[in-house]
Amino acid sequence: MITVVGVRFKRAGKIYYFDPGSLGLAAGDGCIVETSRGVEFGTIVVPPRRVPTEEVVQPLKPVLRAATEEDYERLENNKTLAEEAFVIAEEKIKKHGLPMNLLEAEYTLDQSKLIFSFAAEGRVDFRELVKDLAAVFHTRIELRQVGVRDEAKMIGGLGPCGRSLCCATFLGDFQPVSIRMAKEQNLSLNPGKISGICGRLMCCLKYEHDIYEDTKEAFGTSCPGCSHINVDELYHEIEEEPGYYEDLLAEDTIQEVDYQMMVETAEIERRTTPDLIEESVESDQKQTKKRAKTPKKGKQSKESKESPESKDGKDGKGKRSSKRRRRPRRRKPKQAPKETGDK
C-alpha cells in the first residue's frame, strides 16, 4: 500500500496520482507538480489515501509544493497570453494554407513551453509553421493532434438529450463503446440517434450496459421462437405465482387502463413460463386443426338454405344424389305429309 493524491489539470481531465509526501493537502487545494510537459498547476480532486501499489504507475512523482497566491496570478496571466497566442497561430495557419483546425493554446506554469492542440483529417506537415511560431513567441512550441472525441471535449456543446456533453463536464477517460451495447438495450440502430456530436457512438451507452447484462443473466431471454419481450422485474418480484394475472382479468373492478396492462402482463407470463408455453402451443395447435376442419361460412350458408329435395338434386346430408333430373327434350314439330299429284 502507498499513499497518493489524485490531481487533475483540467476541469474534466484525467486524474493522475502523485506522492503528497509530508504536505497537508485536501481536496480542492491547488498544487504544483512536475510532469513530462514541465512544471504545471493542478487541483487535488482525490484527498490523500492509501491504494495498492499495483494501481500506481511507477515511478510516482512527488508534489513539489502547495499553490500560493503568486501561482494563481501567474495562472491567470498565462491564460491571457494563451488567448493572444491562439489568434496569432490561426493567422499563421491561414498563411501557410494548412488543412488543420486549431482548438486550444496552453502555456505551462513556468512558460517554458507553448502547446497548441489541433484537429485534422490526416497527417499535416507543420514544420514551417513551428519555425514561424518559435520566432514569434521565443519558447518551445508543441503541436499536438487530437481525435474527434477530444475535439468535442475541448470545444464543448449540447448533446441529443439537451444537456452539456458528458465528456466536457465530468468524464475523465473515454470508455470503449460498441454497437453491441445498443443492440442489447433494444435501441434504434440508426446512426443519427445513437451518435454524439463527435460522430462516434454516444458515451452514455456504456452507463447502463452492466445493468442490462445483470438483468439478462437473472431473467434470461424470451422463449425460443417468440419475439423479444422486455420483462419488467417489478411484476416478478411482487407476484411469482403462475397464473396470477390471468385470475385478475376476471375481476369486474379493473379499470380500462389497468385491464390492458394486465392483458399484456398475462401474455408475457404465458410466453416466459415453461408450463404455460406448452399449454399455449397445444391450444394453438388445436385452433389450427379446428380451423382446417370447419368449412367456410359461404358454403355453410348455401348448404343450409338448400333443402334435401332441392332442384340441384342434393340429399339431406348435403351430398348430390345419384339420380339426376334430366332436362326434357324439345320435340320437333311434325311435318305435314307431302301431297302426291294423282290427277
Image (cartoon, helix red, strand yellow):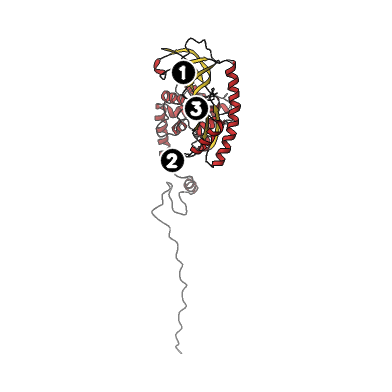
User: For numbered disc 1, what is the local secondary structure?
Assistant: strand
Amino acid type indicated by mark 1 = Tyr
Q: Is residue 163 visible?
A: no
Which of label 2 and label 1 is nearer to you?
1
Q: Earlier in the sequence, mark 3 or mark 2?
A: 3
Q: Is residue 218 above or below residue 88?
A: above
| Neighbour tally class for label 3: few under 14, some 14-19, many 20 plus, Cα within 10 Å | some
Percent across and percent down for residue 309 are 46, 51
**Residue 274 image position (x, y, % from top left):** 40, 27
Mark toward the viewer: 1 or 3: 1
Tell me if residue 77 can be seen.
yes
Which element type, helix, strand or loop, lies under badge 3?
A: helix
Quadrant of the drawing holding the N terminus = top left
Q: Nearer the viewer, residue 188 or 290?
A: 188
Between the residue at mark 1 and the residue at mark 3, the CA separation in whole angstroms equals 52 Å
**What kind of element bears circle 2?**
helix
- Residue 342, relative to residue 149: is it above or below? below
Given residues 216 and 102, the one toward you in this image is 102
| Residue 211: numbered disc | none
Q: Which residue is mark 2?
A: 291
Amino acid carrying label 3: it is: Thr
Residue to which mark 1 is pinned: 17
Q: Looking at the picture, how far across and down is residue 117, in whole percent?
A: 52, 32
Residue occupied by mark 3 = 265
> What residue type is disc 2 on?
Arg
- Residue mark closest to the camera, 3 vs 2: 3
Q: Residue at x 60, y 20 (%)?
A: 73
